[in-house]
Amino acid sequence: MSIQGETPFVITVPHEQLSLLSQKLALTTLPDEIDDARWDYGAPLADITRLVNRWKNGFDWRKQEAALNAELPQFTRDIAIEGYGTLNIHYVHKKSQIKGAIPLLFVHGCNFHVVAISLPGYGFSTAPSKKGFEIPQYAEVAHKLMLALGYGEYVTQGGDWGYRITRKIAELYGPKHSKAWHTNFPISGPPTISRPLLWLNHALSALPFLSYSKREIAGFERTVWFQRWGRGYFAEQTTRPQTVGYSLTDSPVGLLAWIYEKLVEWTDSYRWDDDEVLTWVSIYWFSRAGPTASTRIYYEAFKAADGKDMFSLVVHTKIPVGYSYFPKELVISPRSWTQVPNLVFQAEHEEGGHFAAYEKPEILVGDLRKMFGKGGGAFGVVKDKNGYDA
């Protein structure tokens, strides 16, 4: 059934863009590399050389384009954002055959009507052109999209920026519209005196009977590694996104190296196929607003937070929330740090990283089914939509 205001969308990259990409790849100049550098200095030269050669000779974008179009029911819709005009938003809208399917906004199959949004500035959505478009505006876009699709009540799932955006949706639009939220990026900073028992336990954690578990210590080590060695991109994109944007927009190989590094280091030994990597990177390269647009959310959100750690700030929402923990996430907080009164679901997994929805989709979907299914802590939160036919 057609929904008013919704325009079917298929990915069709103009031939001229493909031709220009081929010309740029043909003119590639690669840097040298220190002996035995491996991953210590960034994306290895051997890997990037192999990927560039595949991109030039053998990678078939039209094949990947056709596969995406065949698999994903895509649409666009104009969404008016207060103070920022109208943006044309791209999204996937996969309706379930289950009569009582739960509307799920997925920000990044099962018994859900899934709406997966391309955030403004990403993929095939347009980008804002005014300063100050940050987390509340992204939340407004997503919320208005769900209302436009006829979902007056819905639940959300998000990781990475989706964690911040779905949390903000819970704050702004719950409990009237947003009924529950789930994240695979549950993080919190160290406890403060405002939570005295937790603060005291942390202060005395060197004592054997108050020490953290081996899993929690491994989480600290992963976090320290990321803070020390994995956040160079974050410093650049939160302070000078336009500067790095010239390289990302003009050089396909620069963009490839910038993204490939994260795909490898942020996952849990995921075996990336070269064409898989090149498809990810090509979507950034061929995005409607260009690669630079996707970096500006970092600047705007960081500026709005006045330089504070905008991810680990504990914010209590009033609707049910669920957490999934994966061992190769970038920042891993002990469970005790992330506990909130409205927490109704938790699951800790033995494998998976930052891109859990892509690496381990069956695990993440299983968690959502447990949280929203019969016996789950968020079962029946959406009126007349419990995820079942009867």
Image (tube, rainbow, N blue to C red):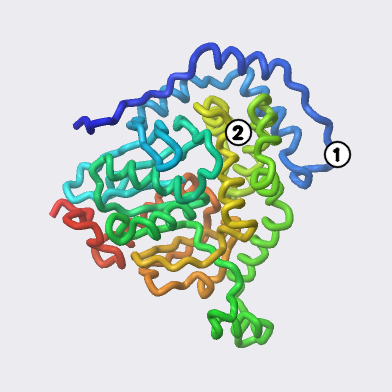
Q: Which residue is mark 1?
A: 34
Instruction: Give residue 61's position: percent from left, percent from top.
Output: 51, 21
Question: Dots 1 and 2: beta carbons under 8 Å?
Answer: no
Q: Nearer the viewer, residue 309 or 117?
A: 309
**Looking at the rendering, in which quadrant would you find the C terminus?**
bottom left
Q: Could you tell me which secondary element the residue under label 2 belongs to?
A: helix
Label 2: few (<14), some (14–19) or many (≥20) C-alpha neighbours in 10 Å? many
Q: Residue at x 61, y 18 (%)?
A: 21
Pinpoint residue 238: horizontal percent, then vertical percent: 65, 47
Residue, far left: 390
Mark whose residue sits in front, 1 or 2: 2
Where on the picture, by quarter, is residue 370? bottom left
Residue 249, position as x, y percentages in the image: 64, 27
| Mark nearer the N terminus (1 vs 2) | 1
Task: Tell me the residue at 76%/33% (across/down).
Answer: 45
Report the amino acid beneath label 1.
Ile
Residue 59: image location, x then y, percent: 56, 22
* Marking on residue 292: 2
Residue flagged by tag 2: what amino acid is it?
Thr
Question: Is residue 367 visible in this depiction of the protein?
Answer: no
Q: Where 355 falls versus 6 (above or below)? A: below
Residue at point 27%, 60% (across, down): 373
Pick the front one: 96 or 181: 181
Q: Residue 181, relative to residue 45: is it above or below?
A: below
Q: Residue at x 66, y 33 (%)?
A: 245
The quadrant of the image that shows the N terminus is: top left
